[in-house]
Image (spheres, grey):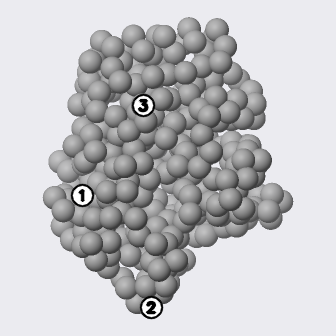
């Protein structure tokens, strides 16, 4: 694995493109960090307690003694589930501190709106001051803080640019929403949350790639692996999205370390709630983002391998329904 201190020093000195060897190491490390099929699920309307319960239930601690980059879903400032709920962000940050994180920095690049405007409209600057959190607006980074990655076999014409703080982070925690995406992505969960680590100039190519867009989303995920993923499904867009859509109440909090497993469970939730044709009429592991991520070795390769753990009878009953949906697609 790349020594992160050396990587940061090299990048600051003007290394704007990952060497083939460094990129290969990043991709290999990402694959080695993926593949844990266990997903924790809590069904509760108490957002704060659900965040704590689901992380405790998952039983992992990727942040102890580490500086953490916390990546939310702030595509726009529209209210949850269009963007990460501020209460979820606070509860998660407090839990990470309890787990021993030495510092927490929220990092994001929004779009289409200006990132600074989104952060201001959501009150994230004030939230960070109140809770002793750092904040990085990726859109405001200098040119030398963007690193070009060109993975082998990519559907990107000439690679994509990654915010250097993501690559340099000692631990990355990703928190996403559970929703459909009407502009080509089909769904927005943990895999698509990674779009926000890329430069806004990459978005023209991504959005214009009607046939490869979902594969390109998955390919971004090759360059890093979050140590923890928290998906807030208290409310869900079952159609439309990502900014607005048809809402259904789900009262769910989901956590895992495998982006494919987390998104597969999220897609099962959409199927259970009743969603649009793209969700209901396509098998979960045939969805473009999932299928490409599996090809790249970024996570679990079969719905049958996913294990959902719970801590109460109500959550267990709901998890069993999701397992039934996943099993039908095996």
Quarter-wise, where is residue 101 in the image? Answer: bottom right
Decide if residue 59 is in sight here.
yes
Q: Residues within 10 Å of mark 1 (few under 14, many from 20)?
A: few
Which residue is tagged 3? Answer: 37
Classify the position of the N terminus by image quarter.
bottom left
290 or 228, nearer to the observer:
228
Expressed as whole percent of the image width and height from the top left, the position of residue 10 reads 43, 85
169 or 105, nearer to the observer:
169
Expressed as whole percent of the image width and height from the top left, the position of residue 227 reads 53, 49
Q: CA distance from mark 1 to mark 2?
A: 33 Å
Q: Of label 1 and label 2, which has the lower sequence position?
A: 2
Kindly identify which numbered label has been placed on residue 109: none
Helix, strand or loop at disc 2? loop
Which residue is tagged 1? Answer: 208
Which residue is tagged 2? Answer: 13
Q: Are marks 3 and 2 in contact (CB under 8 Å)?
A: no
Left of 123 or right of it: where is 253? left
Left of 284 or right of it: where is 166? right
Q: Is residue 107 above or below residue 307?
A: below
Expressed as whole percent of the image width and height from the top left, the position of residue 112 reads 45, 61
């Amino acid at each position: 694995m790349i020594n992160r201190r050396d990587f940061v020093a090299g990048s600051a000195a003007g290394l704007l493109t990952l060497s083939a060897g460094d990129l290969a190491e990043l991709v290999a490390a990402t694959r080695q960090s993926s593949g844990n099929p266990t997903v924790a699920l809590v069904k509760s309307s108490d957002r704060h307690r659900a965040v704590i319960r689901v992380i405790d239930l998952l039983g992992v601690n990727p942040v102890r003694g580490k500086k953490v980059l916390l990546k939310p879903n702030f595509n726009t400032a529209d209210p949850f589930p269009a963007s990460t709920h501020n209460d979820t962000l606070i509860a998660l940050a407090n839990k990470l501190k309890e787990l021993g994180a030495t510092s927490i920095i929220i990092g994001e690049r929004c779009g289409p709106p200006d990132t600074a405007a989104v952060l201001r409209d959501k009150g994230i600057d004030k939230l960070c001051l109140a809770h002793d959190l750092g904040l990085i607006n990726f859109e405001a980074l200098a040119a030398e803080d963007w690193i070009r990655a060109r993975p082998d076999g990519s559907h990107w014409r000439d690679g994509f640019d990654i915010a250097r703080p993501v690559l340099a982070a000692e631990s990355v925690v990703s928190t996403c929403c559970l929703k459909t995406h009407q502009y080509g992505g089909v769904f927005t969960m943990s895999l698509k949350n990674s779009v926000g680590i890329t430069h806004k100039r990459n978005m023209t190519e991504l959005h214009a790639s009607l046939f490869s867009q979902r594969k390109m989303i998955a390919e971004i995920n090759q360059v890093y692996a979050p140590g923890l993923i928290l998906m807030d499904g208290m409310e869900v867009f079952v159609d439309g999205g990502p900014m607005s859509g048809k809402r259904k109440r789900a009262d769910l909090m989901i956590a895992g370390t495998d982006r494919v497993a987390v998104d597969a469970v999220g897609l099962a939730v959409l199927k259970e709630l009743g969603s649009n044709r793209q969700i209901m009429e396509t098998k979960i592991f045939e969805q473009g983002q999932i299928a490409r991520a599996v090809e790249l070795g970024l996570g679990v390769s079969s719905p049958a391998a996913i294990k959902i753990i719970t801590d109460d009878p109500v959550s267990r009953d709901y998890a069993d329904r999701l397992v039934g949906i996943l099993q039908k697609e095996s």
